[in-house]
Each structure stands twice: as structure tokens, then as C-alpha cells.
Image (spheres, grey):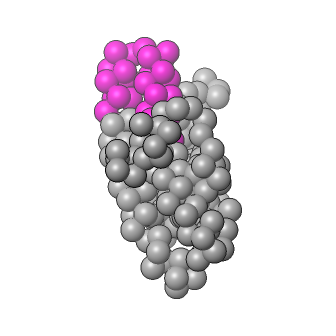
Amino acid sequence: MKAFLRDHSYNAVKMFLNQFATAIFGFVLALASGKAQNAVLRNITSAFAILFYLFLLYTMTWEIGFRDKTAIDGGRKQYQPLTGLFISLLANSINFLLGIFIMLGALTNLSFFGKIGSVCVSIAVIIEGMFTGVLANRVAPETPLNSFWWIYLLLPIPALVTCLVAYILGAKDKKFTGLFKFRYPESDRDPKEK
């Protein structure tokens, strides 16, 4: 555990900072489309922000897996396919803590947890802003998705799955598209590629 934190705490912090930056971007898009009072535009911009966030996570985690590939192939490191998932869990620990406090605030009658839950909802809206447009959709005439406590526990799941898949693909040097193909400097390239 200590070695994992030493090796990947920087990556987890970087993931969280990517989330925060994308959350601000998604929140601004949701506010702009909300001002336009266009639900379709709000959903499209929110979907774009979510996909952009997942794309950032995918490329970052794929590169971590690709870097580990050389150590794994050389026998200096053991292949751990869940590394991407664990990095994402570490990066999303704040999201899960917020979700737990929101759940406690909703399910208990204690005013202490109710107040903490309300504060946590406000924080979650900011740091999970890329989901704001989608969470504004109503499942009943007066009930938007963001009024359900359990939704805040589900929001990190796309990031966890993306990072799990990205690390495995990176460690195996598999790509979805040519978008992730690294081009080595001329001096390091195979003579057949020149």
C-alpha cells in the first residue's frame, strides 16, 4: 500500500485536478444552456463535458499503463491489472466521502448529518460539475435526478471503469484508435519506421 501511494499519489492528485477543471467547464456549460432554457442543449453540453472528462482520464491512465509495460516486460514490476482502478479510487475518494455524507444526511433524522449532507451536496455540485446538466433532468414532474442521494455514489463509476480499462489497454499496448499512437523521436525509432 505504501509503495502504491508513493508511486501513484501524484497521478491521483492529477486526476482529481483534471476532474475539478472539467467540472468547472461542465458547470459553466450547464449554466449557459440553463439560461437558454433549452433542455436538449443542456444535455448535449453535459454529455460533451462528461465525455471530455472521461477522455482525459483515459489518455492519462493509458499512458501510466504504457509506462508500466516496459517494467512489466522486463520483469522489474509485476502486472497488476487493477492499478488504474485503484488510482481512480484514490482520486475519487473525495467524491465517495461526499456521497456517504449525503447519504447519511438523507437517511438519518439527525440534524448534524442533515447539515453536513447539505454542505456536501453544494460541494459535490461544484466538483462534479460535468454532470450538472444531466442531473437537472427530471424523473418526475417535480423531482430532478440530483435530489436522490444515491446518485452521488454512482457518479464516480464511469471514471473507475474508464481508468480500469485504460490501464489494462496501456499495459498491453492496445489502442482504441490511432489517436493514442506514440511517435518516438527519430533517434529512438526502428529503422523500418523511418
Q: Is residue 39 magenta?
A: yes
In this rendering, does residue 23 appear at all?
no
Given residues 160 and 71, the one toward you in this image is 71
Seen at 44% across and 16% down, the residue is 41
- Quadrant in which the N terminus appears: bottom right
Q: Main secondary structure of the magenta part?
A: helix
Q: Position of residue 53 (x, y in %)?
A: 45, 41
In this rendering, does residue 66 appear at all?
yes
Given residues 63 and 192, the one toward you in this image is 192
Q: Is residue 57 above or below residue 96?
A: above
Identify the magenta region.
28-54
Q: Residue furthest bottom?
A: 2
Q: Residue furthest front?
A: 191
Q: Is residue 137 above or below residue 99?
A: above
Q: Position of residue 29 (x, y in %)?
A: 35, 28
Seen at 47% across and 46% down, the residue is 190
Seen at 39% across and 64% down, the residue is 13
Q: Is residue 132 magenta?
A: no
Is residue 164 shown left or right of residue 39?
Answer: right
